[in-house]
Image (tube, grey):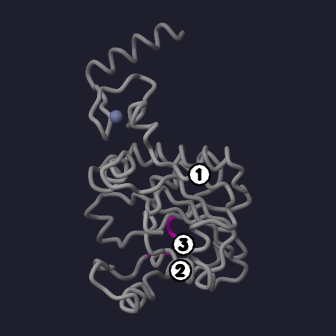
Amino acid sequence: MPFLQDIIDGIIDMFFPEYCVFCGKHLLPDEHFLCIDCNLDLATVTFSDFQDNTITRLFWGRLPLQYAFAFMHFVPRSPSQAILHELKYKHNKEIGFYYGQVMALSMKDKGFPADFDLVLPVPLHPKKQYYRGYNQAELLATGIAEIFDKPMETRVARRIRYNPTQTHKSMTERWQNVQNLFQVTRPSRIEGKHILIVDDVITTGSTIESLATELLKIPGVKISLALLAMAQEI
Ligand SMILES: [Zn+2]
């Protein structure tokens, strides 16, 4: 009964009004997290070649990749920054799950090959996850796993070192800093598997390189990537 649903939506909205995370405008029932104008302003990534693109080129000579997808460009003071800010610092877990689904629908729409076996969010250090209360990459991965109907694995690898801020380090220091960040804890679960690594934002790619390098030590493992956002400097 659509009419009754409208009334229920109206009542819910009266008590829990929702606002655009970027401009603050009151959202209509069919708008989610962004109003229609901000959604139109969202700098989505346009490439649909998943083997040769900005992300795969970033890893040339560093990592063998099957496919890579990114949903949007990170643009300061824009709707994309607002989404990431909500996801990482404002404890907005729903936005993570929602944009995981949006990413997956976009991947399907653009013909991203669905031949991966499992979805693996980049693990946070347990201490960091404890303080934040959740792993934002895991929220995205949950949405992707659901849309593609694939299992999500969160316990096959763990982060063993706290990674301090990289900002003031040289390239060599950064590389040394991300060496041995991760440990594969259940190699038997990923042997021979094609793994889709999911993360919220990619800048230098060094964290993903560190994780994937460990995963690729397990026989038969193949790696693809799905990122919510890519930094402008890539
Ligand atoms: Zn807006």
Disc 1 from disc 3: Cα separation: 32 Å
Camera-side residue of 56 and 16: 56
Give the residue type that dot 3 points to: Val
On residue 156, which mark appears?
3
Q: Quadrant of ligand 1?
A: top left
Q: Circle 1 sits on which residue?
A: 46
Please report contact status of discs 2 and 3: CB closer than 8 Å, yes or no: yes
- Pick whichever of labels 1 and 3 is earlier in the sequence: 1
Tell me which residue sits at (42%, 77%) in the image. Answer: 159
User: Magenta span covers which residues?
Assistant: 154-158
Q: Are marks 1 and 3 in contact (CB under 8 Å)?
A: no
Image x and y of residue 195, in percent: 64, 67
> Which secondary structure class fits the magenta region best?
loop
Q: Residues within 10 Å of mark 2 (few under 14, many from 20)?
A: some
Where residue 19 sits, quadrant-wise, is top left
Element marked by disc 2: strand
- The label on residue 184 is 2
Q: Is residue 123 above or below residue 213?
A: above
